[in-house]
Amino acid sequence: MHQIMDEDTITVGALSVRFVVEAADSDGAASVFECYVPANSRMPAPHSHDGFEETIYGLEGTTTWTIDGETVEVGAGEAVCVRRGQIHGFHNHGDVDATFLAIATPAVFGPAYFHEISEVLAASAGGPPDLAAIGKVMRRHGLTPAPAGAA
């Protein structure tokens, strides 16, 4: 398993993200990013989005998604579509690192979101992140934070 790391890689907490297709590359039709999820880690901010669908395609390892309360395992070669408005989040419960592609259609979502979230996390200096600041960044980029306890 390899972690994606180059000058285009954005580190967000334990996760690494690298966009391979941005809005300008597809005339706004889709944006695509590769996400590296270390073993025994999770995406800490379940959310929904009303402006785009997000299709997840597993490349390596397995991620466990919760989508509107339903659990879906996405392994290599498997896919799931998160529809607009569905609350979702994911974990890597396994002992093996995982990588997936996320395809946002249309491409109203891009690298700026991950850069801004990374800055908020860095500002916490290893302490608890500023949840209000995270929520503001999410809303600015078309994501709606889930109510506490969702996903």
Image: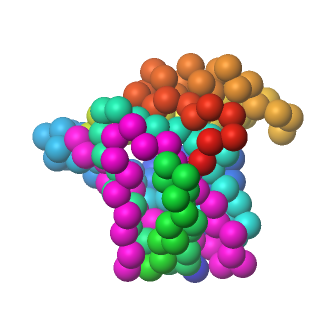
Is residue 96 rendered to the left or right of residue 110? right
The image shows residue 46, relative to residue 108, as above or below, that is below
Is residue 6 rendered to the left or right of residue 27? right
**Residue 37, image quadrant:** bottom right
Q: Is residue 99 visible?
A: no
Q: Is residue 43 visible?
A: yes
Figure disc tally: 0
The location of residue 79, given as percent across then percent down, is 36, 69
Is residue 53 part of the magenta span, yes or no? Answer: no
User: What's the residue at 37%, 64% (across, down)?
Assistant: 80
User: What's the residue at 45%, 66% (across, down)?
Assistant: 100
What residue span does the magenta drawing correspond to? 77-106
The image shows residue 7, relative to residue 136, as above or below, that is below
Quadrant assignment for the N terminus: bottom right
**Residue 129, image quadrant:** top right
Is residue 95 rendered to the left or right of residue 12? right
Which colouring convention does the figure follow? rainbow
Residue furthest front in the image = 69
Residue furthest right in the image = 127
**Residue 141, image quadrant:** top left
The location of residue 43, given as percent across then percent down, is 62, 50
Is residue 102 part of the magenta span, yes or no? Answer: yes
User: What's the residue at 39%, 75% (across, down)?
Assistant: 78
Residue furthest left in the image = 27
Is residue 3 rendered to the left or right of residue 79? right
The location of residue 144, given as percent across then percent down, is 49, 29
The location of residue 130, given as percent across then percent down, is 74, 25
The image shows residue 95, relative to residue 43, as above or below, that is below
User: What's the residue at 86%, 35% (across, down)?
Assistant: 127
Asked whether 51 or 125 is in front, the reply is 51
